[in-house]
Image (cartoon, helix red, strand yellow):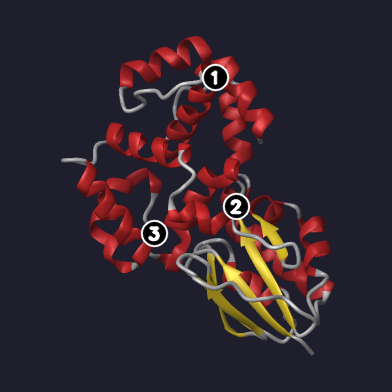
Amino acid sequence: MSNIVLLGLPGLYQNWLMSAVDPNSKVQLHGKQNFFCSQSRVKWVIKTGLADYPVASDDLTVINLIVNENNFPWYMYNLYEKTYDIKIMIATFAKDIIEKGDKFSIFDHTKNDLLYQFDDLRDDNLIEYFYKLFRSNDHYLHTATRESRNNYINIEFDNFAQPDLLANKLGCVPGFDLTHFSSLYKLLVDRNSKYLNRKKDFHSRLANLCLDYDIIETAYIGKLASIVFNKELDWGNLIIRQNVLKHKHQEISDLARELC
């Protein structure tokens, strides 16, 4: 039977996936939303910072997690809030990234980047930081999250909210068992529904002219607004954000749906 490698992304259901494709795995619940897989045929490799990608073959199956550009903001919740149960919560991001940033390399990089750019981490500065991150294409997280190969089993962020599609893709993994997968998927939904539905909930609130958004949502709205205006915006400026939302809310909402 061929070897199996998971090219994983922190927070994106890695331990769950290692168990879901291996009916002989051992998995336990971790915290309120995570999983810990202590035994699996799947070898886990973190993609961020990976120099050489494995070559898939008849003897090596590669499962590759990816995040498309317009799902990148929603992946931020998984990355910061779920990874290793460190809980860098978006609602208390400034406090958490300072207090817990040294517990994981990506978080430490974020903290140092923020402290280098800003004298303080008020919401306007955090919104500006993520706005620029969402508009860029050369950050190492963009590179890692989008890396794929045609002969990999590429599992995109949205696939986790589509059980039939997810099962169909993972059905190519040697030893895959649909009954085992279905049982594990129910657990995933029970523990992660707010993450699986976060994008859908955002689009609903945006379409209903909601004006209450967190720093990630506000930064992503800024990216959409910059597409509408076809220019860079001073999105860290509260007055500009308020005026844009007042006059371009519907166009931004329509564009968000189009890019969904």
Q: Amino acid at mark 2?
A: Val
Determine whether, in the image, residue 110 is placed left or right of residue 202: left
Quarter of the figure with residue 234: top left
Answer yes or no: is residue 215 visible: no
Q: Name the spot of residue 132 as percent of width and height, x first.
A: 40, 37
Query: Alpha carbon of mark 3 to alpha carbon of mark 2: how far?
Result: 21 Å
Residue 123 appears at what percent x and percent y?
A: 30, 35
| Residue located at (62% from left, 70% from top) | 16
Q: Is residue 28 left or right of residue 212?
A: right
Q: Secondary structure at mark 1?
A: helix
| Amino acid type, label 1 | Val
| Residue for badge 1 | 228
Earlier residue among tags 3 and 2: 2
Q: Secondary structure under badge 3?
A: loop
Residue labelled with disc 3: 87
Q: Quadrant of the N terminus?
A: bottom right
- According to the picture, the residue beneath numbered tag 2 turns out to be 67
Q: CA distance from mark 2 to mark 1?
A: 23 Å
Asked whether, in this view, residue 60 is left or right of residue 29, the answer is: right
> Quick one: 250 or 148, which is closer to the camera?
148
First in residue order: circle 2 vs circle 1: 2
The answer to whether residue 74 is visible is yes
Kind of residue sitting beneath label 3: Lys
Residue found at x 48% / y 24%? 226
Mark 3 or 2: the one toward you: 2
Mark 2: which secondary structure?
A: loop
